[in-house]
Amino acid sequence: MEFYDNESMFELGSKMKVRVEMIGGDDPHGGGFRGGKYPVVIMDDVYKDPDRIYDFVNTLPVPLSNCNYEKYYGNRITIDNFIGNENFLNTLAMLLLHKLEMTDMISYDTATNNNQFCVNIIHNDKEHGVTGTQRKESYIPHSDPSLITSILYLNKDDELETNGTGIYRHIKSDLVGYPQDDLQQDWITDCEKKGGAPIDNSTMRMKKEVLENAPVELKYDECIFANNDEWELLWESTGKYNQMVSYMGGMFHSALFDIKELIDIKRLSQVIFWNFVPAEMPPMGINRPVISPRNVMGETLPQVN
Ligand SMILES: [Fe+2]
């Protein structure tokens, strides 16, 4: 029998630094500058002992194939209910809800039972990899069903030239995300109202229609590192070791990597899909409804962070 001490392994660092960057940009339809509308949370030095997590993740066996996940580049390990520790999850949940301005949207009780804690490994495996077309879906900007998605980078800073996460605006529809439920939609509209560019439900409906009617072609041969005709890169992280980046899960995002680098080395990250009970729902109880974080197959677009 093997055990690991999750209480000490996932202990938060006492020097953890938290900051918020407000991202956005020019309205591509001439509506003026709308920068600083959407918060992204960046936490540095998250783990007290990140090397311990690195060693743990880096030595996990990699599955040869991914059930239902052929759309992902490389192979992925998802460990459901892989609880960091209660303090880790509760502290981060409170911080993120506050910093992402979501505290009035959810009924906070405890975060520990309702989140998916994943280990993500991307590598360029010629023998066991998926087909070229399927691979292309991996790095097209997409929206997650989770209210918040966090990614914590676990490659040491000298291991990869290119690493991180991009957040995008779909230019034609002017949407910074595809809202997959009312919470996500409310959050986007709230953010946009605050900046003086009012958006009502009919505008949001129209934007979603434009998005849904815009074919997402698998035409990119690599991650989108700069603006193009279809996507505006609003913000990007550099994939710093022991840094966690968190954003509203429905915002368009994708992993940033150079697949040519990932032949002999793995891209290592931890992903947390945070879900909470909406504020209008009844508090903890036997029949309390829960937003499932495992609605992967229901996603409109692929999911890699
Ligand atoms: Fe994702």
Image (tube, rainbow, N blue to C red):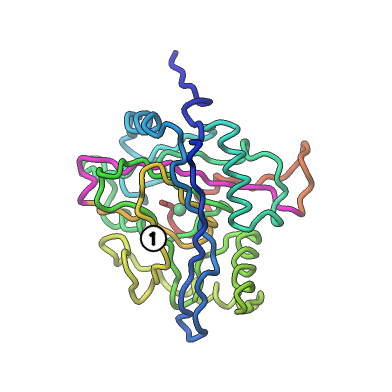
Q: Which residue is mark 1?
A: 236
Q: Residue at x 49, y 42 (%)?
A: 16
Residue 299 visible in this rendered orientation of the protein: no
Q: Residue at x 25, y 43 (%)?
A: 159
The x, y position of residue 261, in whole percent, is 21, 48
- Direction top: furthest residue: 1
Q: Is residue 114 left or right of residue 3?
A: right
Q: Quadrant of the N terminus?
A: top left
Q: Is residue 87 left or right of residue 70?
A: right
The quarter of the displayed image where residue 142 is located: bottom left
The x, y position of residue 4, in whole percent, is 46, 21
Task: Give whichever of 246, 79 is nearer the camera.
Answer: 246
Task: Give whichever of 148, 295 is nearer the camera.
Answer: 148
| Three-letter code, disc 1 | Glu
The quarter of the displayed image where residue 125 is located: top left
Which residues are the magenta region? 260-279
- Mark 1 is surrounded, within 10 Å at the Cα level, by few (under 14), some (14 to 19) or many (20 or more) other residues, namely many
Q: Residue at x 67, y 39 (%)?
A: 110
